[in-house]
Image (tube, rainbow, N blue to C red):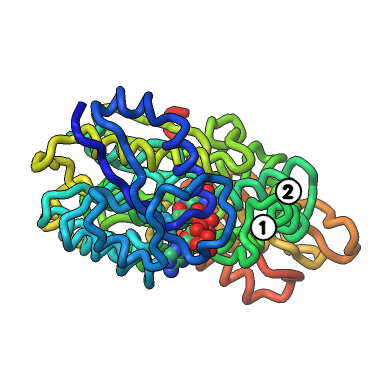
Amino acid sequence: MADALKIGIAGLGTVGSSLVRILGERASELARTCGRPITITAVSARDRSRDRGVDLSAIQWFDSAVDMANSADIDVFVELMGGAEGAADQSVRAALARGLHVVTANKALLARCGVELAVMAEDKGVLLNYEAAVAGGIPVIKALRESLTGNVVSRVYGIMNGTCNYILTRMEKEGLSFEACLKEAQRLGYAEADPTFDIEGNDTAHKLAILTTLAFGTQIAADEIYLEGISNISTEDIQAAADLGYRIKLLGVALRTDSGIEQRVHPTMVPHDSVIAQVDGVTNAVAIESDILGELLMVGPGAGGNATASAVLGDIADIAKSQPGTQRVPVLGNPAASLAPYTRAQMQSHEGGYFIRLTVLDRAGVFADVATRMADNGISLESIVQRAKGAEEDSKTIILVTHATTEHSVRQAVDAIKSGTYLAGEPQVIRIERPKAF
Ligand SMILES: NC(=O)c1ccc[n+]([C@@H]2O[C@H](COP(=O)([O-])OP(=O)(O)OC[C@H]3O[C@@H](n4cnc5c(N)ncnc54)[C@H](OP(=O)(O)O)[C@@H]3O)[C@@H](O)[C@H]2O)c1
């Protein structure tokens, strides 16, 4: 049997400690599959005294991840600390600079400087693997980077944040408010103490930026993503969506258009009978539409120690199986130097259906005025209904669903409605996304 592959793991939290445990439990099976043993020779975290539920006594400890990356006794640097800057950034660069293979689960780091890191890896002829960085255990990176080679991808979209999906699912199933569901998610450990990054869509945006690059062969453009979180979704929206045959999900969507690539993260209404609408709780789903294959939909665990460690393990095994000097899978699907500049399609020209919920004063002529504003802007309506708002007697709710139109037209129409005197609350606008095959 070939020599052991020596790995150093920086970060022993949820993912890192699961990985250490699994590598111990599956050592002989992995050695057989990979044709060589995989041995943990070094680990690093902040607090050496913390009990991580795994035996680290025979493994060299480093207080500094950068020192570990410079240690002579590792072949692969596994980065599981997180964060776009600081120790993760410095140690991954140190490892690549000296020609070590790197495995990371860090979407924030890749979204910020993935192209630079890819150039470093390709210059050294080493692998930079990051399957766990998008949708946890779902093998979407491999699908886009390797399996779909030769396909022209038209759209990639998905549910990529378990916290948001958990909250939206609970809101729908139990009629609870956003705040109540967020508290419950925090209690169960599905949401961070500071959940802003998840609920405002930034986490999904990081993952989407990586998928966009793999799907369309463009530079990573994480700062060019239209972003809207889920914190202003109300139970009223969820109920109205359900009445109309839709569910609300936080989707990340990357779409090829004639004027460039649309990247957007926002609450989205998806038809109730589509598969993605049935993806509940912390589960993730990613759909890829391409010309040769058609539509591919992958659903599975998007987070958690085991699911994420499973993806990291697959990345490590790929390195163990590879022959030195034959690293032929470009980090970002295409050689980093050949990635095209990213051209952003303007959000104003986004085309699709829209759900609009208006709270209006209960006056004669309002309903007709709303319909007129829509028509003035060339918006044709699939449905328009008026219902009593309930508690407040002098207001009503008008719910509109449009046929395909543009963001520009909808904004114009909503602005025109706002300039009237009958609105009793801020209008709610939610985009509709229609899966092709599923
Ligand atoms: N958790 C998931 O479900 C999941 C899913 C997909 C991807 N990921 C990604 O996986 C990575 C790890 O996530 P996690 O949930 O395992 O995080 P975590 O539980 O917070 O663990 C982070 C670990 O990194 C260590 N660390 C932090 N800063 C360090 C530094 N400067 N030097 C050395 N060690 C340092 C911490 O040390 P101490 O333990 O001593 O504090 C801890 O062991 C992140 O990039 C995350 O985005 C996580």
Foreground disc of the pair 2, 1: 2
Q: Along the polypeptide, which appears first: circle 2 or circle 1?
A: 2
What amino acid is labelled 2 in the image? Met
* Closer-to-camera residue (265/281): 281
Residue at left 26%, top 40%? 5
Residue 274 drawn at (x, y percent)? 54, 31
* Closer-to-camera residue (180/363): 180
Residue ID for mark 1:
233
Query: Which quadrant holds residue 152?
Result: top left
Q: 394 above or below 315?
A: below
Mark 2 closeness class: few <14, some 14–19, many ≥20 residues within 10 Å: many
SS category of the residue bearing label 2 = helix
Residue 409 drawn at (x, y percent)? 47, 62
Query: Which quadrant holds residue 395?
Result: bottom right
What amino acid is labelled 1 in the image? Ile
- Between the C-alphas of marks 2 and 1, the distance is 10 Å
Q: Quadrant of the N terminus?
A: top left
* Closer-to-camera residue (263/221): 221
Residue at left 24%, top 63%? 70
Disc number for residue 171: 2
Q: Is residue 274 left or right of residue 288?
A: right
Q: Are marks 2 and 1 in contact (CB under 8 Å)?
A: yes
User: In the image, is the residue at mark 2 within 8 Å of ligand 1 by its beta carbon?
Assistant: no
Q: Is residue 318 visible?
A: yes
Query: Which quadrant holds residue 44?
Result: bottom left
Disc number for residue 170: none
